Image: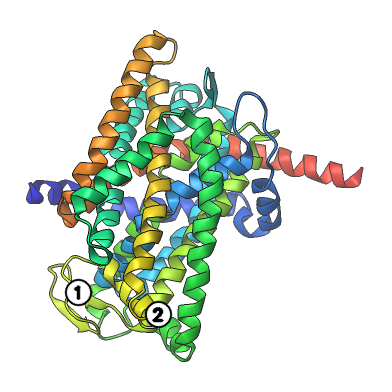
């Protein structure tokens, strides 16, 4: 099983996907005249719009759902894994992916707004509707929707649950099975309420957990402030293989940075686009700008907070692709990469690290799986669009049962296999989404120009 999963993962995550993701981000950045920098003020104003119509959720609620999907185990376990197998330089490539990915997020979210459709629960859409309405290729929409359901409802849900259960088991006298059951029960209470309840819970939990986590990270990094210059130097030197320790794993450094960056911020994966379609906003580009900023919050803020805690505290090891030790700064921890972050917090708050990271992980995972449910439900709604509503409701109930079972199953599975399954799902969704939005990007550029023109005219008046 391990060998099969590993083989498929290598096919999906071949160098072509890395080039595609970085290349698309660079291309969209140029085409939008680096909207992720040029319009950062407008991004912030767009996401704090809480107005919504009767047919959708507000821009802020959509931002929170998307951010809850982005902020998960990738911000704690994913960052630690990237450092373990790519060295400090992997953090640099996560930054690169976030910077260029913000423009990708703008294009995919704007297009999703343009091609959304009405449903009894509100607006829905995503790459599947982009493929059908924009490219006139319904079969591509169907394939993407099926991949999304498998990836989000099963693979990625197991990844999140696995990360939460392992950290809970390390910090508290709770078995992985028990933590999985508890998480499944808490999740069930929310998802049965549909998109409006998910949006309400996400808008409360997400800002609280993100800023609370960053605040603690600032304290830990401040405690090790003398090591900060050396840490930044190691990030940049390792990113290009200058450091002799990581010189031989430059390929892994770039690949891990890109892979974990995409896994964390989801730019180009299509998930943020699904949430954007649910927002009821005045201009298509408005939601695109809001989603661009969520990429920054996820990677440049939350992921960087984790990375700096680990690197300034020195609570990490560097391994090669076969798991052989290249640099030993900390005790051998096996596959428990979350312990890198836990031990970093312990350097300042002795005995508190495991508990804090475990609680943070529960919040991150809980909100992320809520978002995964939304993506999966949207895919089912697309597949049953125009068909018998009773059949749609039945399949959605089955989806809920499958996701809750995935939470429990993922909690007790081996971490490496679960992570690879998640990577396969993310990779497949990214291949489809990025190629699709490249073909339709001129429409997103026009929407941006129209929105900027409207803003300019409003200021003139």
Per the image, label 1 sits on a secondary structure element best described as: strand
Tell which of 457 and 157 is nearer to you: 157
Query: Which residue is most to the front?
Result: 173
Q: Earlier in the sequence, mark 2 or mark 1?
A: 1
Residue 175 found in image quarter:
bottom left
Could you say which disc has been placed on residue 455 in the image? none
Q: Is residue 3 visible?
A: yes
Tell which of 449 and 186 is nearer to you: 186
Image label count: 2
The structure residue drawn at horizontal position 41% and vertical position 53%, both measured from the top left corner, is: 363
Compute the Cα span from label 2 to label 1.
Answer: 27 Å
Could you tell me residue 380's position as x and y percent?
37, 24
Tell which of 20 and 331 is nearer to you: 331
Vertical comparison of 335 with 136: above or below: below
Could you tell me residue 233's position as x and y percent?
43, 85
Could you say which disc has been placed on residue 319 in the image? 1
Query: Which residue is most to the top?
Result: 388
Residue 151 found in image quarter:
top left
Q: Which residue is mark 2?
A: 349
The structure residue drawn at horizontal position 46% and vertical position 29%, both measured from the top left corner, is: 193
Q: Is residue 137 visible?
A: no
Vertical comparison of 86 with 453: above or below: below
Per the image, label 2 sits on a secondary structure element best described as: loop
Graded by Cα atoms within 10 Å as few (under 14), some (14 to 19) or many (20 or more), the crowding at tag 2 reads few
Vertical comparison of 281 with 92: above or below: above
Indicate left or right for 378 with 297 as reference.
left
């Amino acid at each position: 099983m391990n060998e099969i999963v590993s083989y498929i993962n290598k096919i999906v995550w071949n160098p072509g996907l890395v080039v595609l993701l970085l290349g698309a981000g660079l291309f969209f950045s140029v085409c939008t005249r680096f909207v992720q920098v040029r319009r950062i003020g407008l991004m912030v104003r767009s996401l704090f719009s809480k107005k919504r119509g009767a047919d959708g959720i507000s821009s802020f609620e959509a931002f929170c759902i998307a951010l809850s999907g982005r902020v998960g185990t990738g911000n704690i376990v994913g960052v630690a894994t990237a450092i373990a197998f790519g060295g400090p330089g992997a953090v640099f490539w996560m930054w690169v992916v976030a910077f260029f990915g913000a423009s990708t997020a703008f294009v995919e979210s704007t297009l999703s707004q343009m091609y959304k459709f009405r449903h009894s629960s509100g607006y829905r859409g995503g790459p599947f509707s982009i493929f059908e309405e924009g490219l006139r290729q319904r079969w591509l929409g169907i394939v993407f929707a099926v991949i999304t359901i498998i990836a989000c409802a099963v693979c990625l849900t197991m990844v999140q649950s696995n990360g939460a259960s392992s950290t809970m088991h390390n910090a508290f006298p709770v078995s992985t099975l028990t933590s999985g059951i508890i998480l499944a029960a808490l999740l069930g209470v929310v998802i049965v309420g549909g998109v409006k309840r998910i949006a309400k819970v996400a808008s409360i939990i997400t800002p609280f957990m993100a800023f609370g986590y960053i605040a603690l990270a600032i304290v830990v990094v401040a405690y090790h402030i003398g090591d900060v210059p050396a840490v930044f130097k190691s990030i940049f030197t390792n990113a290009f293989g200058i450091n002799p320790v990581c010189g031989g794993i430059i390929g892994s450094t770039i690949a891990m940075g890109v892979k974990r960056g995409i896994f964390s911020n989801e730019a180009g994966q299509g998930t943020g686009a699904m949430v954007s379609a649910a927002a009821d906003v005045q201009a298509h580009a408005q939601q695109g700008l809001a989603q661009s900023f969520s990429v920054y919050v996820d990677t440049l803020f939350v992921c960087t907070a984790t990375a700096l805690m680990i690197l300034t505290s020195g609570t990490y090891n560097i391994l090669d692709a076969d798991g052989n030790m290249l640099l030993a700064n900390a005790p051998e921890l096996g596959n428990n990469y979350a312990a890198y972050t836990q031990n970093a917090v312990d350097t300042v708050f002795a005995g508190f690290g495991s508990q804090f990271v475990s609680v943070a992980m529960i919040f991150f995972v809980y909100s992320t799986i809520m978002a995964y449910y939304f993506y999966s439900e949207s895919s089912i709604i697309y597949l049953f669009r125009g068909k018998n509503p009773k059949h749609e409701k039945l399949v959605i109930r089955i989806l809920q049962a499958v996701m809750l079972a995935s939470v429990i199953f993922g909690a007790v599975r081996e971490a490496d296999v679960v992570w690879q399954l998640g990577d396969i799902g993310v990779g497949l969704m990214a291949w489809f989404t990025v190629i699709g939005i490249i073909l339709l990007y001129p429409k997103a550029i026009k929407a941006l120009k129209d929105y900027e023109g409207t803003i300019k005219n409003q200021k003139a008046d």
